Image (cartoon, rainbow, N blue to C red):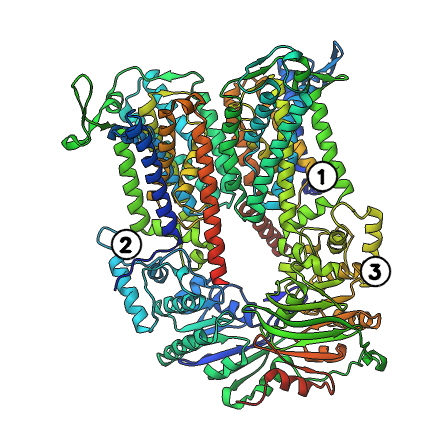
Amino acid sequence: MKSVKDWIKKISKKPLFLPLFSVFLVLVINVIYDAVQGNYIFSFFTFELKEGALYGRIVDILNRGSEAAILAIGMTLVVSSSGGTDISVGSVMSLSGSLCCMLLAGFGVTHVRGPEELQMPIWVGAVAGIAIAGVVGLFNGFLVARMKIQPMVATLIFFTAGRAIGLLLTNNKMVYILLDEFKWFGLGKTWIFPTPTVIAAICIALMVLVLRFTSLGMYVQSVGINPRASRIAGINSAAIILLCYVICGLYAGVAGIVATSRIYSADSNNIGLNLELDAILAVALGGNSLGGGRFNLAGSIIGAYTIQAITTTMYALGVAKAQAPVYKAIIVILIVVVQSPAVKAYFAHRKAQRESLAIAGRS
Amino acid sequence: MKKKSINNHTILLLITVGLFIILYGAGYISYGVIETKGFEKLQTFLDILRTNAALICIACGMTCVMLTGGIDISVGSLVAMDCMILAVGMEYQEISPTLLVPFVLLIGIVFGAVMGYLIGYLDIQPFIVTMAGMFFARGMTAMICTDQVNIAKSNWFKDLAAIKVYMPFDIGAVVNKRGVKMVPYVNVAVLIALVVVILVFLMLRYTRTGRSMYAVGGSHTSAALMGLNVKRTKMITYILSSFLCSIGGICYCMNTMCGTTTQALGLEMKAISSAVIGGTLLTGGVGNVFGSFVGVLINGTIQSIVSFNADLTRLGGTVPNVVSAFLLFLFIMLQAVFAKLRERKQG
Amino acid sequence: MTFPGVKALQNVDFTLREGEIHALMGENGAGKSTLIKCLTGVNDFEQGEIHMDGKPIRNHSTLDAQKNGISTVYQEVNLCPNLSVAENLFIGREPLTKIGTISRKAMLNRARELMQKLDIQVDVAKTLDSYSIAIQQMIAIARAVDMDCKVLILDEPTSSLDDKEVEKLFILMRSLRDQGIGIIFVTHFLEQVYAVCDRITVLRNGQLVGEYQIADLPRLKLVAAMMGKDFDDLQSIKSKEDEAVSDELEIEARGLSHARKIKPFDLDIHKGEVLGLTGLLGSGRSELARCIYGADRAQTGTLKVGGKETTISAPIDAMRLGMGLLPDDRKAEGIVEDLSVRENIMLAMQSLKGVRAKIPMDKQMEITKKYIELLEIKTPSTETLVKQLSGGNQQKVIIARWLATDPDFLILDEPTRGIDVGTKTEIQKLVVELARQGKSVIFISSEIEEMLRTCNRLAVLRDGEKVGELTENLTQESVMKAIAGGERN
């Protein structure tokens, strides 16, 4: 009995406990749901190969969660280094998609139906879209790192303007790129996997490699934990924070291209809508403090997919898309309340009281 | 003997007012004098007030929250929920607005109390808590009804919304082409908004609660050491914000007369940017509702100018966003420069 | 009140009389702030009692203390800079009108009266941040006085004031004393103690050294009381040949200064030399070192390192020139608390190599293990978070951080503060060993005896100025004389 308790205590202190526990809960709910519905109870875990492409609920979650996962990577760095959040990423996604489509179609053109109508190669458009997102990241980073403006305020500027500039670029119209080559980013498949999952995997792999083969991770955390000590130890805090925002911007650009390709059109008003909130939530769910400092990239990524799994599960349970935020809100509040210092202190106090009572009882 | 003190904050407010005059003046000259499209009419100004009445109420609440160093991003969704409750209540449930209006206000208070408790007493970041509030209210809106509900049945609420309050003594009256005298008017929502601005202004200036908000934002450790109840002050602030937001929601409903799930999207950011343009610091402690009021007017004027310009109108509703983002940038930079200057002065 | 390993305050008696200004003196870690925190209810204490007017009181918070008539004014003013002077004076107890709103008029009038009574020249309607720190402090004092305080604690109020402002503050202090208020005055400036105080209590290492009438305690005795003059029997860790210093200059500073922190100074440091910077806390000893290292960017003057003129605008520049700084505030500027021991040790070395050249993990482990062994750092593992170690081990981690970069010139600012005697000796030995290897060291400590054992030469600082150097005949007596600066009182 006691060993189980100890085991639970030990495991609940592991950094990845919270996100993995959430995943576990989602899985359990899915299994119960399938059981109640009379389906094969493990149908959640089944994969199918249809016309050379992989299908299944897990594949679907990984696919749909790609954008949030990509954003969560950049957001993790931003939160860790500056102790604030970048709320412009959703808007920047839309901007990057709009620029890409505008370049491909030409200004004012609303439909591209054949390859001959393309103004430039698709990859040039995609790169330009990602690049502009990087520029926005640079701007945000400059305001935060050099001008010492709170991250949320600084990124509020492009939260407001990003989408709007996107609409100006597309002449306030939906721009459709009806080419399979363009749809590939969001709807295509690479070998048997949906392309977005592959792109997300590449993004994750890139960041993992960067963290593994450079000391960026240590710098970012050091700056986030104690900027003064980091400075004395020779780290240029401003440059590190700036870099984090640029990375966050570039990743938002990638996510933007994927999201645009999914609907093969630049829909400035809807691409990436509220996705910044998902990304922030993913970071928090991943066990990272939104106050900055130590980060856990794996946690954030699992967090992002968990959110998608929750969403997908909710839809499966028959919750309407528009109503899902209610449950999301409740989950968020539960997580932060459990993590809040006041509640932790309360339980620590209760524990101390119990222990002192126990000691008193023994003597 | 009595010297008027002019400090950085007063300068920021003066810049805001000056900017409003310049913007409005530019619109006036371009579309009132050079091209006579009607910008010169008093009605144009009153229309800015009319379309932004809800935002004015919300910006007042947001200012209070920002004064304490917090943020409330739940307001847009709360407005949507309020509108939906009003619309569904009147249309489908046929509940009298006499019950519904106080109910909506009560919901605002409860909503704010929960968020305020989490922020003040449990010390959770305002951004996260109000983000959850935002999700919750938006989702609840959809739970109540996913369709657009128009308020068609007649009741006193509808009548009240339709009332035109004409300017007294025919101020700004013009005679149109058909020879009919047109007296400029506002609606009840504008009056409510103005009363809110004045009341909140007085509250911030003349009550202990109001001054505590400034103190908490100025330095919350100092405020605690001076014997103020910081936690309670924070909670009250969020209650006030949500309450004012519900008043704003009622004003919003008076203008739109409907409830939809996508209503008032992004309104929170408009309120925040209005407050920032009006000279309120996000770090807390500095600002007042008058500045935020002018901030709302600036955003409204930009929108109005764009609607008068055919070229810009063709580009759609996004131009104001770009301009207002640029202004936001400008003001943030100004504030940063002033902060740097003060730092230098104090060594 | 205890801190891990070190008892912060033991059996200290302290008496404050009505209508006196009482100086509370002691070096870092002497227990001054702990004593004050116990008096004002910030910290709880384990044994003993506080009596006020003969009655025992116990404060559980600063608010309790205020209600009991004990108010504190800190160096960083605890008022709201964005509110007006009048509001800061009366917030939480504003005069109200009949309908319960604040009567601004009455408040302004009362504020003006109060300011007049205390002879402070301010416009009470202006915001607090339009006034200098000195005035802000006086306003904080005025607030305390108006709240019927009987005991006023001034915790280093003069650290950021200039001479004129200090004089104004003293006038106010004297007039309050004459009104019967007891004032506890904490400062590091000897001049000021003799200018304004009636009695002095000296603490050292958490213990009471003594309580003296100001007339009975000349400067030299005060310094001796604060720093401790009991010669210990420990053998000198320096040998004769360690006294020999190369003629080659490592550092040559001419006219370096930083506004308000350190007046222009010249300083030479030779290769293989241990230079001690001595002076009381706040004398500019840390600031001088920080100025060379670029932690505070020098505003005037030139600096030659290894014979070549250089400008240092950020610590990384200094590091590239082979410098290292162990700052005095370990928590604020030393450790990165949520990083592991390994990461903390590797930090400086890694930032010298640049972000792209990550030191391979096995190399990191090798270096970390080497220094854990060399410095005998007590840690469960290399991956333990540094905040979980004791103070002495944290300090060793930071020393390891710099040793790993193999510096030519190391600045150690109070490396032995708050750590046990054994570790102290280890660190002293290490300093001498570094010099033996031809490295230059600046060593800063509050303990003269420690300096005498390790340093070849001492530079003396007083009130933000370098006032002299001592090379020969280094004795406790001569050093204390130099620190105290003559026998003017």
Q: Residue A62's quadrant in the figure?
A: top right
Residues flagged by tags 3 and 2 on a common chain:
yes
- Give the residue at mark 1: A4
- Whether residue B212 sits left or right of residue C383 in the image: it is left
Q: How crowded is mark 1: few (under 14 residues within 10 Å), some or many (20 or more)?
A: few
Element at label 2: loop
The residue drawn where x is 71% and y is 61% is: C318
Q: From where the camera sits, is residue C285 visible?
A: yes
Q: Residues within 10 Å of mark 3 (few under 14, many from 20)?
A: few
Q: Where is residue A350 in the image (x, y as percent from the top left)?
A: 57, 49
Q: Closer to the camera, B58 or C312?
A: C312
Q: Distance between the residues labelled 3 and 2?
A: 66 Å
Q: Which labelled disc corresponds to residue C373?
A: 3
- Whether residue B74 sits left or right of residue C234 in the image: it is left
Residue contact between numbered discs 3 and 2, judged by CB atoms under 8 Å: no
* Chain identifier of the residue bearing label 1 in the image: A
Q: Quadrant of the N terminus of chain B?
A: bottom left
Q: Which labelled disc corresponds to residue C102?
A: 2
Q: How far apart are marks 2 and 1 (CA)?
A: 60 Å
Q: Closer to the camera, C212 or C141?
A: C141
Q: From where the camera sits, is residue B243 visible?
A: no
* Chain identifier of the residue bearing label 2 in the image: C
Q: Position of residue A310 (x, y in %)?
A: 60, 25
Report the amino acid beneath label 3. Answer: Glu
